[in-house]
Structure formats: structure tokens, C-alpha cells
Image: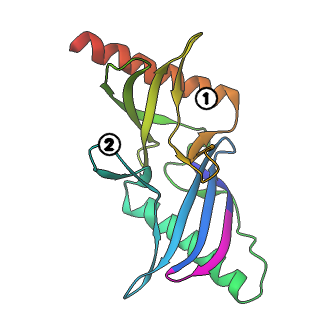
Amino acid sequence: MFITAVKVTPVNKQNLLAVASITLCDCFVLRAMRLVQGSSRRYVAMPTRQTGTGRVFEVYHPITAQARQVLEELILGGYDQQMSGESFDPELPVQLGSDCREFVITNVRVKPYDELKLKGFASMVLDDCLVVNGIKLIMGKQRRFAQMPNVRKKTGKFRDLAFPTVPEVREMIEKTVYDEFIKACEEA
């Protein structure tokens, strides 16, 4: 899988230096990464969410050292270039996982949950290098759908943190997640 777009926006607010987003294979966006100045080094922090029980989890994160290194180098490099007055124009695409140029889901885990509309939670692994957590399986009035992880803004509106940009990828995600949901329900 390849990173095909990167956006780094300097913020410089206390320890927060910048926010960043990337696009994978021209079809899936990961946003709200934060470049943070820690006590000993700068690092890229992934967006987090808190469950109703108080458990905090990362919405998405790299699961290989190589993927984390690629993300950090891109985002740190972009920030440094912009702060030195240069324009940020990385050489793209950048390989993140395998050399496959397609958007690939290599694993899906589903936890059924039986509430009125909420039927479960899912996480998916992308190209064995990145995991996306907090996908909600919703049974709507007219159809079922996979709600991508999001955050409520101060205005009350929701903003997706990880999402497909093309309908074919959304359909692939929903089909893959719901196929695993059906298997999990049959096994329970």
C-alpha cells in the first residue's frame, strides 16, 4: 500500500507542533495525526477516542515499526520544511506496507453488540501494516452501513477521522466488515 498524499499544517500551540493527514492509494484518508514535542523528542501521535467505560484507544495506528517510521519521517520532514520557509512537496507515492498499489484489507475483527441500531464494532487491518479501530456497524432504517470512526466538533457536527473517498472502497469495507459480522454472530 502506498501513501499518495500528505498534508502537514503547522499549529505551534504548546507541545502541539502540527496536525497532519495522509491519503492511502488515492482512496482512503487518515486525518487528525498530531506532531507533538515530547520531553525528549518529537513524535507523531494518532487520534484517540474514549469508550463509554472510560477506556481510551487509538482510532488508527501503524502496527509495524517500518510503517510508523515512514509516517514519522514524512510528517516530521513536512513540518521541518515548512518551518524553514520551504514548500512541502514530498516525493509521492511512498510505500507504507507491501508493494501492492491497491487498497487492501488483510484482516477484520468484529465484536457483535446488540443495541437498537448499533449492531457491533469492528477493526480492520490494512495491508498488514495499519489498523483502523472503532468502526460501528449500524442498522439504519433503509440499509445497514459501517460508520467510520469520527469525532463530534464543537458545532455538534461529526467529522470522520478515517474514511474512504471513493464509493467502491466504501462498499468493499462495508461488505468485508458485514461478512465478518455474520460469521461472528453464527459462531456466538
At a point 42% along the width and 16% down the height, the residue shown is 179
Q: Quadrant of the C terminus?
A: top left
Circle 1 SS class: helix
Residue 6 position within the rendered picture, expressed as x and y whole percent measured from the top left = 67, 61
Whether the magenta-drawn stretch holds residue 8 is answered as yes
Q: Amino acid at mark 2?
A: Gly
Residue 68 position within the rendered picture, expressed as x and y whole percent measured from the top left = 44, 63
The image quarter containing residue 45 is: bottom left
Q: State if disc 2 and disc 1 touch (CB < 8 Å).
A: no
Residue 29 position within the rendered picture, expressed as x and y whole percent measured from the top left = 62, 47
Whether the magenta-drawn stretch holds residue 83 is answered as no
- Classify 10 Å Cα crowding around label 2: few (below 14), some (14-19), many (20 and above): few
Instruction: Decide which of tag 1 and tag 2 comes sooner along the chain.
Output: 2
Circle 2 SS class: loop
The image quarter containing residue 64 is: bottom left
Residue 178 position within the rendered picture, expressed as x and y whole percent measured from the top left = 44, 19
- Classify 10 Å Cα crowding around label 1: few (below 14), some (14-19), many (20 and above): some
Q: Nearer the viewer, mark 1 or mark 2?
A: 2
| Residue most extreme to the left | 188
Q: How many labels sit on residues?
A: 2
Between 137 and 98, the residue placed more toward the observer is: 137
Per the image, the residue denoted by label 1 is 170
Question: Is the stretch drawn in magenta largely helix, strand or loop?
Answer: strand
At a point 61% along the width and 64% down the height, the residue shown is 20
Residue 52: image tag = 2
At a point 40% along the width and 17% down the height, the residue shown is 116
Residue 126: image tag = none
